[in-house]
Image: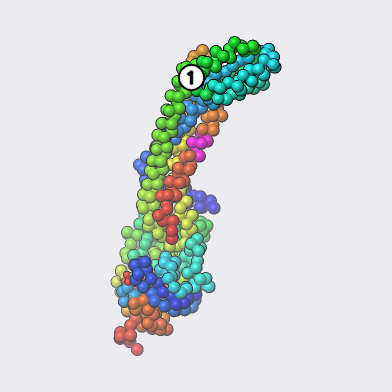
């Protein structure tokens, strides 16, 4: 068993070295495409958190006063149900409001500690049938009994959201193109490697090496490229996460509500590594396909 | 050990290389496969190795019907068969020792076994002193001896040789045949395709003659061709 491991690692290293330039090209394209992909995912998370208020199509919020009566809340609900300009709405009770408060002010534990669920207002999140109805709905509900305020999201935030949506799709498309080309590069590297070693392969088959034994060093070669590429990409994601934390840390800036959590970064890193492994293995399997038959 | 039952092989292009061949080779036999070029000798050997599949009939090797062997069991079959070719098929980047050891390594033999077996086999073929040389530093006869060592090192039941002396001069050929004879005496079955009339006539072993894919002669203690002069 140990002899086999030694054999595989030696053969893999020899092959990687023999194809050094192709190997480096493979690693770099994997790294660039996965960095782009990971970076986009991270940026999306960052924007998602910052634009939570208007996410899910919520366009305006009706805040009740803190001590609005049950009857007042029920009246507003009835009116919303009857309103022809309202597409849908959702009621946030005090507990839900507190959960969201905790999430939004997660960087401000003092504030969270001081907050009392009872002191938070309940609210309705409203999706208008058309965006143009926003102000009409606001005018209709602001004067109702028990209503404290009707908030509409900042125009700037809304603009940002639609801009990032477009940008996100462009970048995801771009990184998929790059991922596919890195796959092709690995396929090609493995093909070259099998060609360079066709005599060895021929002898191995003649003396009865199992198919897996023949394949493993090449698959390891693809895997190593995918993994090193993914490792570099993870480093880029981590650097970006640290960057986001420090560049936009001002508590008063426009981006104060934007953030990425460590668990966001970790799950993105996992996705990146899994993709790297897949690209390496699938690439080498495709590259090996030609000689899979006896 | 080897049984051909009504074996026919037709290649994709429609050429029938073997036609209804029947043969039965016992364990420990030494068989010469003779016949003109294109008569199907290499095809006979390739079918045994499962590099090609029979079109009709069946081939039984060591009790197993290899015409029906599943894809993943082919390596197991080949571990029981050593192969020797006219062009040696040695790896130029490996030394004599490494070339022989490679055949054990890639089927996962333990290193301690490799370390004792390889020198023994190199000794058998008379190359113990040249273990550290590369194939390009050897004569043709020596290279063929390396490939015999590689074919024999895993102690196969059968050795298949396809014109192993085709590139060698008569004196070197005699040396190679001595080694094959010695290996045969250990109980290893040998099937050797050849055009070399002299060695067939000299050794007087079983001869199977093919012509246009048909078995036309199967003779114990035979000679190369009917029309050839044989010393009495
Ligand atoms: N892979 C192949 N595809 C198609 N036809 C083939 C293939 N291999 C061999 N043949 C044909 O099968 C016939 C027998 O070939 P084979 O190589 O078995 O002959 P042989 O007896 O070994 O000849 P030689 O003495 O020249 O080595 C020939 O007509 C050859 O052209
Ligand atoms: Mg031939």
Q: Chain of mark 1?
A: A
Instruction: Tell me, yes or no, whether the highlighted magenta stretch contains residue B38.
Output: no
Q: Is residue A273 magenta?
A: yes
Tell me the residue at 37%/47% (across/down).
A188
In the image, the residue with mark 1 has its CB under 8 Å from the nearest atom of ligand 1: no
Residue A157 lies, in percent from the top left, at 48, 19
Residue extending farthest bottom: B232
Instruction: Identify which residue, A235 or B54, lies in the foreground.
Output: B54
SS for callout 1: helix
- Placement of A78 over or under B59, stated as above or below: above
Q: Position of residue B114 (x, y in %)?
A: 49, 59
Q: Is residue A111 left or right of residue B5?
A: right
Stretch in magenta: A269-274
Q: Looking at the magenta stretch, what is its main secondary structure?
A: helix
Ligand 1 - quadrant of the structure image = bottom left
* Identity of the residue drawn at 39% across and 44% down: A184
Count of marks placed on residues: 1
Q: In the picture, residue A261 is in which quadrant?
A: top right
The answer to whether B129 appears left or right of A142 in the picture is left
**Looking at this view, is B41 or A156 the one in front?**
A156
Classed neighbour count for the residue bearing mark 1: other residues with Cα under 10 Å, few (<14), some (14–19), many (≥20) = few
> Percent from the top left, x then y, of residue A216?
47, 51
In the displayed structure, B89 sits above or below A106; it is below
Is A272 on the left-hand or right-hand side of B15? right
Q: Quadrant of residue B93?
A: bottom left
- Is any part of residue B79 visible from this angle? no
Q: Disc 1 designates what residue?
A: A132
Spot occupied by residue A265 in the image (x, y as percentages of width and height): 52, 29
Vertical placement of A54 versus B214: above or below?
above
Q: Residue at (37%, 62%) from the top-left corner? A: B89
Quadrant of the image containing the C terminus of chain B: bottom left
């Amino acid at each position: 068993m140990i002899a086999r491991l030694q054999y595989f690692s030696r053969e893999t290293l020899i092959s990687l070295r023999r194809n050094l330039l192709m190997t480096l090209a493979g690693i770099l394209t994997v790294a660039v495409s996965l960095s782009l992909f990971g970076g986009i995912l991270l940026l999306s998370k960052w924007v998602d958190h910052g634009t939570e208020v208007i996410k899910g199509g919520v366009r305006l919020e009706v805040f009740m006063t803190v001590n609005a009566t049950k009857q007042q809340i029920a009246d507003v609900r009835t009116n919303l149900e009857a309103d022809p300009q309202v597409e849908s709405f959702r009621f946030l009770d005090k507990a839900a409001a507190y959960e969201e408060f905790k999430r939004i002010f997660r960087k401000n534990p003092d504030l969270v500690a001081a907050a009392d669920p009872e002191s938070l207002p309940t609210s309705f999140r409203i999706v208008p049938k058309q965006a143009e109805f926003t102000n009409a709905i606001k005018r209709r509900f602001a004067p109702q009994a028990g209503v404290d305020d009707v908030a509409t999201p900042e125009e700037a935030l809304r603009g940002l959201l639609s801009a990032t949506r477009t940008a996100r799709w462009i970048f995801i498309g771009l990184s998929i193109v790059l991922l596919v080309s890195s796959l092709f590069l690995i396929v090609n590297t493995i093909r070259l490697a099998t060609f360079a070693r066709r005599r060895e392969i021929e002898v191995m088959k003649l003396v009865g090496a199992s198919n897996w034994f023949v394949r493993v060093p090449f698959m390891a070669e693809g895997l190593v490229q995918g993994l090193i590429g993914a490792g570099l990409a993870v480093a880029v994601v981590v650097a970006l996460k640290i960057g986001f934390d420090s560049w936009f840390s001002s508590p008063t800036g426009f981006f104060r509500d934007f953030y990425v959590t460590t668990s966001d970064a970790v799950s993105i890193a996992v996705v990146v590594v899994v993709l790297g492994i897949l690209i390496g293995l699938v690439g080498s399997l495709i590259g090996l396909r030609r000689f899979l038959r006896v | 050990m080897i049984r051909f039952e009504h074996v026919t092989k037709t290649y994709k292009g429609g050429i029938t290389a073997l036609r209804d061949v029947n043969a039965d080779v016992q364990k420990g036999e030494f068989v010469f496969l003779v016949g003109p070029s294109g008569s199907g000798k290499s095809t006979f050997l390739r079918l045994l190795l499962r590099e090609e599949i029979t079109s009709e009939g069946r081939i039984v090797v060591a009790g197993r019907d290899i015409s029906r062997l599943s894809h993943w069991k082919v390596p197991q079959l080949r571990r029981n068969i050593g192969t020797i070719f006219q062009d040696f098929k040695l790896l130029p980047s490996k030394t004599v020792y490494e070339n022989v050891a490679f055949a054990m390594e890639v089927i996962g033999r333990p290193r301690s076994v490799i370390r004792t077996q390889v020198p023994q086999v190199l000794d058998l073929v008379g190359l113990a002193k040249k273990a550290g040389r590369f194939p390009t530093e050897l004569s043709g006869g020596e290279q063929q001896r390396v490939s015999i060592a590689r074919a024999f090192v895993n102690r196969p039941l059968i050795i298949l040789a396809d014109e192993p002396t085709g590139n060698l001069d008569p004196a070197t050929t005699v040396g190679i045949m001595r080694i094959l004879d010695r290996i045969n005496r250990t109980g290893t079955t040998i099937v050797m395709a050849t055009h070399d009339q002299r060695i067939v006539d000299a050794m007087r072993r079983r001869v199977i003659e093919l012509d246009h894919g048909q078995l036309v002669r199967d003779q114990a203690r035979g000679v190369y061709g009917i029309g050839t002069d044989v010393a009495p």
